[in-house]
Structures are given as structure tokens and as C-alpha cells.
Amino acid sequence: MKIGVPKEIKNNENRVGVTPAGVKELIRHGHTMFVQHTAGEGSGFTDDDYIRAGASILPTIEETYAAAEMIIKVKEPIEPEYNLIRADQVVFTYFHFACDRPLTDAMMANRAVCIAYETVRDRQGTLPLLTPMSEVAGRMSVQEGARFLEKPQGGRGVLLGGVPGVKPAKVLILGGGVVGRNAALMAAGLGADVTITDISLPTLRHLSETMPANVKTLFSSSHNIELELPSADLVIGSVLIPGAKAPKLITRDMLGLMRQGTVIVDVAIDQGGCFETSHPTTHSNPIYEVDGIVHYAVANIPGAVPYTSTLALTNATLPYALRIADLGWREACRADAGLADGVNMVDGKITCRGVAEAFGLEYTPLAL
């Protein structure tokens, strides 16, 4: 198979879809690799690294898309890329369709095969291609939250871990999944007073048994969240419904319960966000204020640490990329029902129920 790795053009996105080591492995399996000039530069990989791995370097994004039967990316295509994608071309990347109607319409119109990292499942029912970036985003949510709690950054001027004689900051984490667990570990490690919420009692039991002593668990309800907000210094939203829009757990009215300069970090923003007042931001302009509350809603948080993120992502995606390339996407999906769950769109038809329901569009089971 001919596989293309274009350079990411989303704002401040420095990750790359495949490392040189991944390119070498795909070539070892008999596939032809095309990598756009400087595609890996932001992650610390040069064109020479890819050439030594056996790839051909193409000068433009247009040539990279045109040469490939399958495109491997990191982030969803943005508008300049829409017309570069053609019918039956496989695009393997994060899509997050449910919060992006223009992207959904564009991919339906060009009739590509869209396989979304975020809905691929493994035999345990978990999301193996979302997990590594969720781990990075969860840890960075605390790192960024601590930064923007500083007074010069617009925050309350609170040190997350406190000092002897001064209480640590209170961190409220909404959602006990991969993002929430990693955020809780980071915040606890810095000495914060952490509360993590979830609606799953088995999840809460597991967290209670495995988290450090300064992490408390709380059943997630509007009432309980409202009780926690007045004393919270940092709130991290990390709720995920695979393939669908995130639920709104904090409304505009609830901002009035918080103290001025409180920071909220919406890690779910690429699925529409779990705060009513969230809208996507970028690493170049990461925050804004609503009613005195600092909002951080960067849609590609792991893009700030591209070397770590690219290695972690390729570790997870490469086995699936090899399977698709070796067998073709149809046979690969017949052999692996979890990979089939990743197919969100084929020939202009939506094959992911959550995406169809988000926009009231027709859902077509992949088997059809």
C-alpha cells in the first residue's frame, strides 16, 4: 500500500503521524511511504531520519495526499485539506466528528474511508488509541492549570501544593477515566487537595483503593458539583462519551458559584466541551475569561509536547496501521471488530451512531 504522512497544519500542532521507526516497520512489511517535507521537524525528526528509514520525501501537502492510498495523521483534516482527500482514500487519524459539522459534511462529500483513532476499541472494550494522548492531556491539564492559577496569568495567585502553614489548592476533577486518573495523580503529586468525581461506583471504588491519600472520590451529580465549586481553585473537565458530544456538566450560571480567578480546564473540548461556556482555544492564545473565571480549552493539548506525544501515539497506532495496510481496511475490520468500531464514515455514509445522532443524520451500520 502507498501511505502518506502529511505535515500537520492545525495551529501549533507539532506532532507527526508516524515516527521514522514506524516508517521503517511499514516499509519492512512491503509498503511504500511518502512523508511530506519537514513533517516530523516539530517532533524532533528530520527529513534525513525518514530517508534513512526508507521513505520518499515529497515537497508539498498536495503531493503527499495525491500519492497515497492511505493517509496517517494526528489531528482531523482542516479546511485547506478537505479537497485533497478523495473517494475511497483511507484517512487514519483523530476526527472527533461529533463536534464539527463542517468536517462531517466535507468527509461525507469526498466519500473517504474515515477511521477515527478515538473510537477504535480493544478486546477489553477500552480505547487504546485515545489512551496515550489522554494520559498526556490529563497530566498537562494540571501543569497548565497550575500555570494559569498564577496571578500574572490571570488566576487567583494560588500555589497548587501550598507551603507549610498554608493550605494547598483544591482541585476538582470531573470524570474518572484515563484523563481524570492522570490529572489526579499529577495534582496529588504536587500536593494539592484533590477530589475526583464519576457516575460509576466501580470506578470510584477502584480510584479510592489506588489513589494517594490526598485524593478523595465523590459521586458525580449536579448537586455535588455545585457544593464543590465554591472552594475549588482548579476544575478539570475530563468526561468522555466515545464518538459523541461531551455532556455539559458546568453551566454558565454555575460560574457564579466560583471565586474570581478560578481556573477551569476543559480537556473534553475536542468533543464539544463539558462546560457550557467553553469554546476551543489554541496554544498561541490558550485562555479567555467568562464572569471572572479563567477558561483553558486548547483542543490539542498534547501538541505542546510533540516529542513525547508522537512516540506515545505511534506506539499505539502502528499495529493498527500495519493491519490496515497489510490486509486492506475491509479485511482488517472483518478480522477485528474493535478496529471496525473506528470506521466512522465510508462512501459518504456515517457508520458511527454517535456522530449520526449528534447531527440528526442517517446512521448506516458498517456491515451494510
Image (cartoon, grey):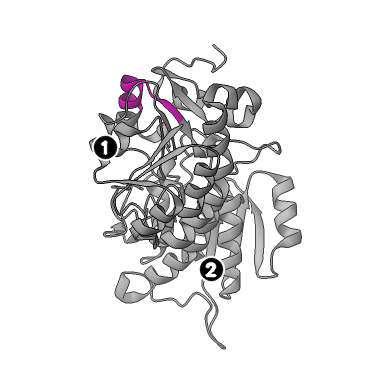
Q: Which residue is mark 1?
A: 63
Frontmost residue, 137 versus 219: 137
Residues at circles 1 and 2 in contact by the CB criterion of under 8 Å: no
Element under label 2? strand
The label on residue 124 is none
Residue 45, quarter of picture: bottom left
Report the amino acid beneath label 2: Lys
| Earlier sequence position, callout 1 versus callout 2 | 1
- The vertical placement of 328 against 175, above or below, is above
- Side of 266 where 317 appears, left or right: right
The x, y position of residue 179, in whole percent, is 55, 53
Q: Residue at x 40, y 21 (%)?
A: 88
Does the magenta run of residues contain 110? yes
The x, y position of residue 267, in whole percent, is 45, 51
Q: Which residue is mark 2?
A: 170
Frontmost residue, 331 versus 291: 331
Q: Residue at x 54, y 16 (%)?
A: 365
- Side of 149 where 342 appears, left or right: right
Query: What is the magenta segment's predominant secondary structure?
Result: helix
Does the magenta run of residues contain 63? no
Q: Tell me where the magenta segment starts and ends, as one range.
A: 104-114
| Residue 64 in sight | yes
| Number of numbered discs on residues | 2
The x, y position of residue 143, in whole percent, is 46, 68
- The vertical placement of 354 against 251, above or below, is above
* The C terminus lies in quadrant: top right
Report the amino acid beneath label 1: Glu
Element under label 1? helix
Frontmost residue, 310 versus 268: 310
